[in-house]
Image (cartoon, helix red, strand yellow):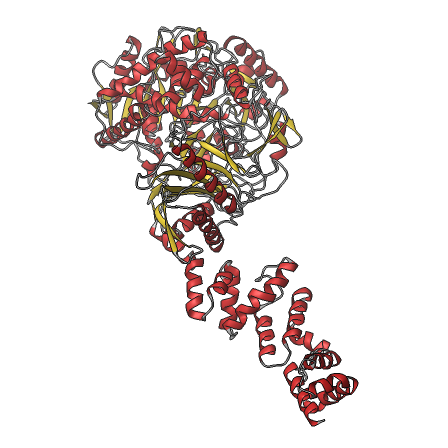
Amino acid sequence: MDKTIFETFIGLEIHIQLTTKTKIFCGCKNSFGDPPNTNICLGCIGYPGVLPVLNKEAVKKACLLCLAMNCKLNEKTFFERKNYFYPDLPNNYQLTQFELPFGVEGYVDTALPDGSIKRVRIHEAHLEEDAGKLMHEQNISMCDFNRAGTPLLEVVTKPDFKTGEEVEAFLLNFRRIIRYLGVSDGNMEEGSMRCDANVSINYIGKGLGRKVEIKNLNSSRHVRLAIHHEEQRQAKLIKAGETIVQETRLWNDDKKRTESMRSKEDANDYRYFPDTDIPPYIITKEFVSELNSMLVELPLTRRNRFISEYNLLLDSAEFLTEEKDKADYFEKACKEGADPQNAAAWIKGDVTKVLNREKMEILSSPLSIERFITLLDFVGKGKINGQTAKKVLDIIITENKNPEDIVRENDWEQVDDSGSLMPVVEKVLAENSTAVNQIKSGDMKPVGFLIGQVMKLSGGKADPKKVKDLVMERISAL
Amino acid sequence: MLKEELFITANIARLELDEIEAEKLNQAATRMIEHFSLMDKIDVDSLLPTTHITGLSGAENRTREDVPAETSIADKLIENAPERDGRFIIVPNVL
Amino acid sequence: MEWNKILSDKENKKRYTEYVNEWENKIHSFLEFDLDRQAPAQTAEQNVLESEKESATVRAAQLISGMPYAVKDNIAVKGYRLTCGSKMLKDFVSPYNATVIEKLNTVEAVPVGKCNMDEFAMGYSASSSALAATSNPRDLERSSDGCAAGVAAGIVPFALGSDTGGDVRQPASLCGIYGLKPTYGSVSRYGLVAHASSFDVIGVLSKELTIVESVFNLIKGKDEKDHTTAGYPLAGKSLSQKSVFGYLGGDIGLSEPVKQAYKNNIDILKAKGYGVKEVTFPLLEYVTPVYYTIAAAEASASLAKYNGIRYGYRSKGTDSPLELMKKTRREAFGDEVKLRILLGTYVLRSGMKEKYFIKAQKIRTKIIDEINSLFKSVDLLVLPVFPTTACKHNDAECGNRVQEKFTAIANLAGIPALSFPAGIYDNLPVGLQFLAPQYEEKLLFQAAEIIAKEIATAVPNAPGFKTIEEICTAGR
């Protein structure tokens, strides 16, 4: 699409499944991946006579996210019935918020790959119930109502995005935010975060075009690709003088294109009206201050602070603030006396490598802050060398042992006294006279080899710098 | 009510109607809609709609603690479904 | 009246069963009847009554303990069907108990059967039931819903009904018994199948005022399964000689018997030294359009859950979920239900919602305001219940869809109302009702007590009615 002629407007509708223990309107477990129709009760599959009872935690998590998105909280809210028939919707109306959602008029800042900050306005955010799931087989559809009644926060942005890349960066940042707050795991593949994109293009300066809604976007990459595709498709139509059909299209990831849904039952009239089984919910001052005390520093702010406070490079700060646990770990280590640069390098490098291999999370792994600091300290003070430190780290994590014990049991303490190293150096020099002669004649290449031999004989625990000094000293004395 | 409106409404409400039924219901519906039109006479623009009757007795937020309820009713609920396949409740969908 | 003691005797039980069968062949008030059914308690946890320490509650528990009672077939009793008078739920057995049933279980009252009713409670006379036709025990050519008929015939001492626009009070009046519609939110709706959730409330029907009051005291209170319930305030107003009763003057469209009963009863109150005051209620003509608009709208959503997928009736041989739903609803809903669903859907449609639904909600606000201001000058209101005496079966003229104009006021405003026997004309009873502010049920019982003393002998029982003692001593 020619960006000198057209501009794109993209707005998102993001559904976030909140991580509560129970469903939004009944006491069934809110969990993913159980056998079909196990987490169901009279309430969430719509038995006659059973009433919805609102989950306090769902309200709390919804409002917390609203505050984190800088939304205003409506003082009085209520739930409404959104009426439409679908086999996976037990009551054939969805309980949702419409006229008075929890959050309105917010914004979220995202750092774009070029370093600039993109501010996207949040139109509103409302709490609602998820529907069940349908799976289709030859001549039947199979209904599983485990998901019916999962609390969802739907966040609606203004059409502030201009490119698919902006949207992708936003979604990654947004996922971090909801994970920081602990309100959702934000897993797009499992559907705990789902995103629909409204895309319209128009000649520059002509304002919004006719919007097309794209669904079935299961990763932030799909979102970007679908937007690119849609921009091309719409531009082509406009250039050909055709009008864009306002419709819902599905992303087909195999064919890498959007396809019209062509639903037989387009004309839905949702007939929203207030549900009378759930009393209105009043947002009190006490509730807001409780929420404020639960708010945490968000990833972008934290990243910027890491750069200024710890002198980290953007890259490291970005890495460390990806997950709240990692950032918390880093900061705690620094507070306990770790050198920030050093700690950052270790966390970003070997620590993450081993944890990933062992499929462990940093905070729950055997690498306690105390052990991590001890390890860094050993290296800093020259008690063990860098190579040994990596081995020690591995054992801490895989065998859940203290670094002190590992070093002692393996006798890995670095040897740097000339007394015990000199016999080894002399032995190596005596056995490698060719190399020694080469060096004496001014070719320094074999130095590394000789050091390596000494290291090997010392079981890896010699201080490599000291060994080099001794080797050079002995050769020049010969 | 126009017959056409009746059919649109019936479709939204997922009620199948044939012509005879539609005729009968349309007469009754038209009479009721006329009755509803009595409401045109009164000016209540300045009033707020009553959406919740409990609002009358003072506000206290009613919520439930996030604690899973002990239930063992799932199997019974599946048995109550007219058609099922294992633990799935099924509906016809001939494509 | 120690029912459980009397019925523990085999012979007595047989006589009682014969009595029930004899009546049932004539009036068909029950859809299911099982004298041996003890409603199983849902949980082992003791259902602690909120106001257990109240002496009224203790007395109530003593009176109701062991009594058999009937339950309208839209209230869930575990193990009984929950048909709602509809083909849709004809074979649907409830897997759970309504909160009111759990509460009555704690005093070991016995739900012995489920009563016929209008399909999904859309009506007051069970004439739209898909499952049976009930007759009024006062006159078998006339109609009644099952609860009122069963109680008036002496089959059970009380019944639990539901009142959306008057469907406890109207049949109670037409059968010559008491019918209480409690304050909205004072009795849990958990287990009551919704017709219109902002109006629905579970009520009590009985021939005895003390039974109505006792059952109400046992079933009221806040419920964690129904968040529209509130704690029932302990202190309420009491009737005194200074109390003033408001009544409507002028032509309010009453048939001659009702007009006479209205006048007579106001005269009784006056003669007893209470203040009576003529009041005006200019919004009366809006009551039914507002009530029907909102009730139909709410019902159109409440009844959407019946689509043949998870339980209940399912149409055979369909090809798609859409067809399944449409055919199921066509085949299993009756005409009245279809009509209300269509109306409710229509008044909520875009383009119609402002004109009908929102407008009705706003007039509802005005009606509530006006009722509240009436209660500043009077303590109670006395109103008719039904414009005529009981209608004949299939009498289309009788009950022309404005018959809820006196009863739906209480549902619109969420206030309590008690209908009481107020006279009898040509062997057909007439009822009137007292209305009080929210949570002032006590005033209603005290007011009805005054009338009861004066009128009890004037309103005889249904012909053939026997007390349990009479039934069991007969033939000895």
x then y, percent, for residue A147: 55, 38
Q: Relative to residue A225, is residue A432 depicted above or below?
A: below
Measuring 36% from the left and 24% from the top, which residue is drawn there?
Answer: C349
Q: Is residue A132 left or right of residue A301?
A: right
Seen in the picture, residue B93 relative to C134 is either above or below; the reply is below
Tell me the quarter of the picture where residue A154 sits: top left
Q: Nearer the viewer, residue A61 or C431?
A: A61
Q: Quadrant of residue A115?
A: bottom left
Where is residue A223? Give x, y as percent. 49, 43
Relative side of C358 to A389, left or right: left
Image height check: is A370 above or below A63? below
Q: Does the rendering let one see residue C228?
A: no
In the image, C284: left or right of A159?
Answer: left
Quadrant in which the N terminus of chain A appears: top left
Q: Position of residue B30 (x, y in %)?
A: 34, 12
For the C terminus of chain A, which image quadrant? bottom right
The reply to whether residue C27 is in sight is yes
Q: Is residue C326 above or below residue A159?
A: above
